[in-house]
Image (tube, rainbow, N blue to C red):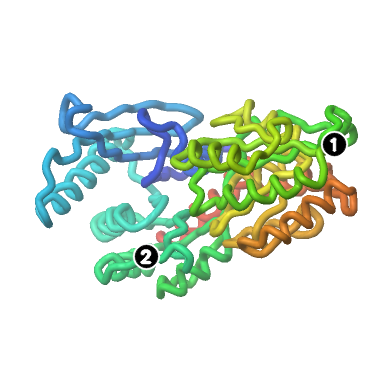
Amino acid sequence: MKISEKPLHVLNLARWYPNRTDPMPGLFIQRHAEAVAGYAKVALVYAHGVKANDLDSQYEVDYEEKAGVRTARVYYRLLRQQVPLVSSALGLWRFYKANVKGIKRVRQSGEEFDAIHVHVLTRLGVLALVYKWLYGTPYVITEHWTRYLKARKEFKGFFRKQFTRLVVRNASVVTTVSDDLTRAMKSHKLFHPDYRVIYNVVDKAFFEVRQNVTDNTFSKQKELVHVSCFTDAHKNISGLLRVIKKLSEKRDDFHFTLVGEGEDLKKLKMYAKKLAIPEKELLFAGLLEGVALAKVMAKGEALVIFSNYENMPVVINESFVLGVPVFSTNVGGIAEMVNDTNGRLVPKGDEEALFNVLNGFLDNQFTFQKEQIRKQAIKRFSQESVGKSLLRIYEDVSKNNKL
């Protein structure tokens, strides 16, 4: 597919996005936008609140054109003082004003948007709904947030729920990254006749880095990898460390590399020392990105996830593209991806079950066709595949809007 003579013009509104203070949030949104940029004209707006002392003016617009995406990051001042109700209302006003400024910056002269793509509800969905009412522009929603899951219990508040239901009801299409998240949204009465699953795009670096799927003699130890944000209540790394400790008491033919950083990293390092896990069997590698992350994951014999709750971690997609199987807890939408051909699932919090899986794997009780895992992943998670899926949605929406 190539851009036609009159390509669709799509505006993305992102609640999370890489920014000057943190390059990590919303990378999956950036990759969605870049994926479709080969087939449509793509603009993106992201508003980010900044402490008043860290911004010279009330609003600051950073504009760039990269990978086919015209992007406006609008930084706006947060309030210096908090006054009940007043501060919330004024903060919301600044957020919407920042987005409007961004939209004006990315809009090209004489062109209108054929569709708006909202990434993460609810505020931006309200803005898209207003645009639909004013200009007749249809909008699509992609939801990534785990707040709808029963384990989170974060989707609450009468007005928030009512506004969210209104926004979802008026969307042309609603997409999620898993059927599990779709079910969770519907459980909150967020009904829509056209829910679709759109996978997260895997970074190009993972397609360029190849694991040697036939030669695993690089070490006498089998390499196992964990990648996460190091929030223990979410990722249950403390439980994983206890499994590693138990495994180390039985054998020494494995090595675990834990990749990432976050609020509990220091505490978990101390906990590993308390457990007296041998240093030769455990490494905290810190934050890795792009090629560096892909190379570490490619050396792994398996990716291990022991989360208490999840939606659909993109790290699973990345692992499969490398041909690396995944051992994970059966939470969120993970069972939609992981099966006996590409990994194993264990019950949430079941340390004995994870130990048995890892121990059996190290004993070669089961193996995987790594090249087959990789081939299937490329078909599902490549930029081209996801970009075409998004384009079909935009074409459906635009066509229906003209009927």
Residue at 70%, 35% in the rendered image:
278
Residue at 28%, 33% in the rendered image:
105
SS type, badge 1: loop
Q: Quick check: 317 above or below 60?
A: below
Q: Which residue is tagged 2?
A: 155
Give left or right: position of 366 versus 77. right
Instruction: Give neighbour class at mark 1: few <14, some 14-19, many 20+ (Cα, 10 Å).
Output: some
Does the image show residue 3?
A: no
Q: Quadrant of the C terminus?
A: bottom left
Q: Quick check: 221 above or below 242?
A: above
* Residue 46 quadrant: top left
**Front position in the image: 26 or 135:** 26
Q: Quadrant of the N terminus?
A: top right
Give left or right: position of 40 versus 292. left
Q: How far from the left and from the top, in percent, is residue 164?
A: 33, 65
Label located before the other in sequence (2 or 1): 2
Q: How far from the left and from the top, in percent, is residue 401?
A: 41, 60
SS type, badge 2: loop
Instruction: Give neighbour class at mark 2: few <14, some 14-19, many 20+ (Cα, 10 Å).
Output: some
Q: Which residue is tagged 1?
A: 213
Look at label 2 and name its amino acid: Phe
Look at label 1 and name its amino acid: Val
Residue at 52%, 55% in the rendered image:
393
Give left or right: position of 62 versus 397. left
Residue at 88%, 30% in the rendered image:
217
